[in-house]
Amino acid sequence: MIIDNINKFRSEALADYEKGVSCYAPFQSMHINKKGRVKPCPFSMQYPHSKDQVQWSLDKSLKECWDDIVYEDMRDEASIGSLHKDYCNYCVKQCEQGKPPSSLDYDTAGGERSLNHEYPKEIELELSNKCNYMCDACSPWCSSEWAKELGLEKDTRFHSIFDNDEHMEALVNDLRTFIHEVHRINFTGGEPFAQPAVYAIIKMIEEENANVGLHFTTNGSVMNGAVRKMAKRPNTRFTVSLDSIDPIAYPTIRVNGVLSKVMKNIDYLVETNKNTVGASFVVTKKNVMELPSILSWCNEKKIRFSYHILENMGFRDWENELKPISVEHENKFYLSSLKQYLVDARDKITKHDDKEFYDRNMYMYDQYIERLK
């Protein structure tokens, strides 16, 4: 059963009675993209042309989206320990392969777990593809630089409805109506600090004096007054999308990035925003052998480690450009050898005196190893 595979990888922090629910995303979370499309997480309703979509608009509020029948259908399946076969096929496939599903991320999203939240507790905003990087694992969907490179700057598929002032103001005012109910807002991109809508939402939160948690996933290249202000704000976190700490590999992976500048900015965030800085890595064949040294670096600086799997985001030549660097599409011998390498390297990873922090980082490392099947 799906629930059995999910529970095999769950943290001990979940009580036994909470493990009957397969995924808490439909009960806790809301993801809003640049087109105003709403779903519980970035992985649900994966196919862009699915007939059943939840769409925010000037005529449909976020609260109405939260109460939509599509959300209710996913909740019904999750509450009986299953996953919706149409909307949640991404995690269904992971479970069928015996791998840790992405639904695990939502066991700890949104604060207190409940099946009865009137409003979403965790909101992720992916409001624009504006970005100064052209990372090798990315696409025009999340990078305006990739759109430019591929001659797709005028392609409306990649434009944000929130570049329109009317839509941006409407979203901000919609969020304002229940901002005090929200546990945390996660800003992603593109690069969030290149998005006017992000600054407008930050301003609204300040006006409302809302004690909502903020989390910025950033490439770490921007260090302006707003970033410094957010770094000093309580209940605020930063995750830097890094992908490599190797000065030779980094610029080949995160094109247009300057590692020394990013590292300097990370040091500022760690010093100013103590204990709430993370680093995330899209794992490919270019950086997977770095993982033990990456974990040591994270543990030394007390940075939270997280990873992502290379996915086909579309609009790129998957077969010739991306699949060749995908770890998951390698043969069994490669995966078996890699798994053994990572297992053998585990004891050499730098430890940290904060056991809870260290255990959490190593839990993520071990979870990645479990995916190598």
Image (cartoon, grey):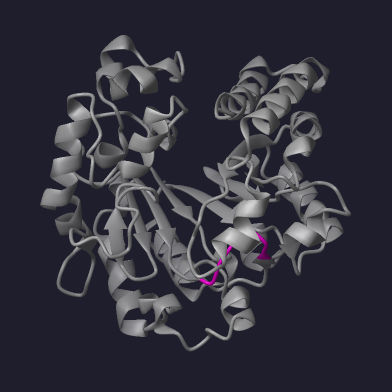
Q: Is residue 108 above or below residue 211?
A: above
Q: Position of residue 331 (x, y in %)?
A: 63, 36
Which residue is at 29% across, 18% downward?
Answer: 18
Q: Residue furthest bottom?
A: 154
Quadrant location of the N terminus in the rendered image: top left
Q: Position of residue 259 (x, y in %)?
A: 82, 57
Q: Main secondary structure of the magenta part?
A: loop
Q: Residue furthest left?
A: 69
**Whether residue 14 can be seen here:** yes
> Is 111 on the left or on the right of 68, as rendered?
right
Which residue is at 60% across, 82% downward?
Answer: 148
Q: Position of residue 47 (x, y in %)?
A: 33, 58
Which residue is at 78% across, 36% downward?
Answer: 289
Residue 119 included in the magenta stretch of the image: no
Which residue is at 56% across, 24% downward?
Answer: 370
Total count of labels: 0
> Is 42 on the left or on the right of 354, as rendered?
left
Q: Residue furthest top?
A: 16
Q: Is residue 53 above or below residue 130?
A: above
Q: Is residue 193 above or below residue 231?
A: below
Q: Foreground: 280 or 317?
A: 317
Residue numbers of the magenta segment: 135-140
**Whether residue 109 can be seen here:** no
